[in-house]
Image (tube, rainbow, N blue to C red):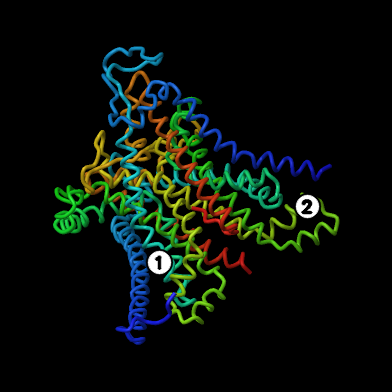
Amino acid sequence: MTVLAPAHRTVHQIRLSRRLASLTGWTLSAACLLALSVLMVWILAVVCVRGLGAMKLSLLTTITQGSGGGLLNAIEGTLVLSGAALLLAVPFGVAAGIYSAEYRFTRWATTIRFLADVLVGVPSIVIGYFGYVGMVEWLGWNFSLAAGAIALAIISLPYICRTTELALRQVSNDLRDAAYSLGANDRRVILGVCLPAALPGILTGILLALAVSVGETAPLLYTAGWSNYMWDGHLTHSPVGYLTYAIWTFINEPFASANALAYAAALLVTGFVLVINIIARFVLDRRARR
Amino acid sequence: MPAMKFRAWLALVAGILPASLAAIVLFLAIYSWPAMHFNGLGFVARDTWNLGNLYADPIMRHGVQIQPGATYGILFLIVGTLLSTLIALAIALPMGVGAAIFLAEAVPARLRMWISFLVELLMAIPSVVFGLWGYVVVIPFLGQHLYPLIAHSLGKAIPFFGEPTGSGYGLLTAGIVLSLMIVPIIAATLRDALVSQPTSLREAALGLGATRFEALWKVMLPGTRKTLIGATFLALGRALGETMAVLMVSGNALNYLPHRIYDPVSTMAAFIVSQLDSALQDPSGLAVRSLAEIAFVLAIISIVVNALARLLLLVWNNSQRSVVV
């Protein structure tokens, strides 16, 4: 390999070309980051401006009527569906997370970790269609809260499992050793010592899973269905409305009142997701790191 | 022994996670079995999705009850899914790498957290909100301004980019919106990998006279190649299965292979949503089962892609951090 510069180029010129290449590289990478940030702000701005423009108090206090009315039924439905999904997913997800962290070298733990990562990648519409043929058709539940909540719970499960596992891994082994040396058994060490220490991290995971549930559409379309009315308290055989459906359906209708519902629903969903992410990032995450 | 009991109990409860994955795959396979039997391997090679004559009496064919004239093929969906994913990756990969480089190396530490947060927030925005944004803002902009521009310049040389540019709904729009949804996966994973590279690497390169960018491009970045491949697979998996945003901007073509980059397409995931209502009209029930077959194929594809991605990241990287996407 020759280290000498070709005779017709001086050292100074080579340095200039390298400097130019570096400058170009930095400029391009800065442009990428700038473009991404601008697009993000653009999306948020569209949602905020149109959403605030469409927002009225009556949207939050009345139910949907045809292509107008309010969103109270959808707000209630989203909260009930996501809440029920969390109730189902948290015990199982946290248990799976505990097992794959505390017994991390066992084959079952490796399997669970791996399958959790695979399940995260399964498209939500696949889980939704599974819910349709499995629960709505085969079990005969029709469009219902139970079918929708179970589909959402399956989606939340791997998030909760993985974040619980990561939070537990942050817990120092000294803590475990100290607890074991005091004579505590596995149950006491895990539930009494490790879990409280990892709680902020676990809560972060649960909150993020909630944000995912609130923003999901595809798995609910053919499990929860849609209803213009408030949820009637039945677990099966009665459809439930939810905000993301309102976004998808009402934006396509030629009526200003319907579009207003879609924009307002988008504002509510995005705002909720945003607030959860900010809490998770700047409150709980910081406490977890301390 | 109470300790053993606790552990066994925990293992059992944790088993619901593998069980639900297995249930999804098994149930879709069993439910779509008659459709698989009737459609055969031609399912992925035919480009006609036709429910047949819904008003005629069902007839028996290959031991399966069907409507006369029914054929189910999803070639146009496979083409649409692959092309939109490819376009998304072609945009997202350079953009994600560029953003990760600048985030990891050039943004001041005080600002980094905020800008990282902004970029990763893209991951948290619901798919249907991307769809709304695409439908309301992006489609008019692309259809009226950008696409005619591309057709007049690039389209002169390459017919695939030529006129007519259509209304803005279509393959390219779907690819662009998809790319935004997967860019943060690539950017966030790569930024973490860059930050965790040993500083001695950079110092050695700088000491040999490399500029800061050369140290980054020729020394640091090659070290993260494996992470980048893993992250790209994750992004691929996400793009293949994305539903709502694609449904709202792709134009939902039926039985149509795109001739131009602006043409309407549909993807496997979006098609399941857009067709279930009409599939329910099929008295033989085969249409609903064929949709289940699409869901099954999509599940298998995404499981393979994600398993590959995780294996790559696991074996190569042995990384502690998992990007939960």
Q: A126 or B106, which is in the foreground?
A: B106
Q: Quadrant of the C terminus of chain A?
A: bottom right
Residue in the picture at 51% in, 82% down: B207
Q: Name which residue type carries label 2.
A: Arg
Residue of label 1: B99
Residue B219 is situated, as x and y percent measured from the top left of the image, at 48, 70
Q: Are marks 2 and 1 on the same chain?
A: no
Q: Is residue B27 visible?
A: yes
Task: Say which quarter of the image contains residue A231.
Answer: top left
Residue of label 2: A188
Q: How crowded is mark 2: few (under 14 residues within 10 Å), some or many (20 or more)?
A: some
Q: B144 or B226, which is in the foreground?
A: B226
Q: Mark 1 lies on which chain?
A: B
Residue A253 is situated, as x and y percent measured from the top left of the image, at 24, 43
Q: Is residue A73 visible?
A: no
Q: In this view, does A27 lie above or below B225?
A: below
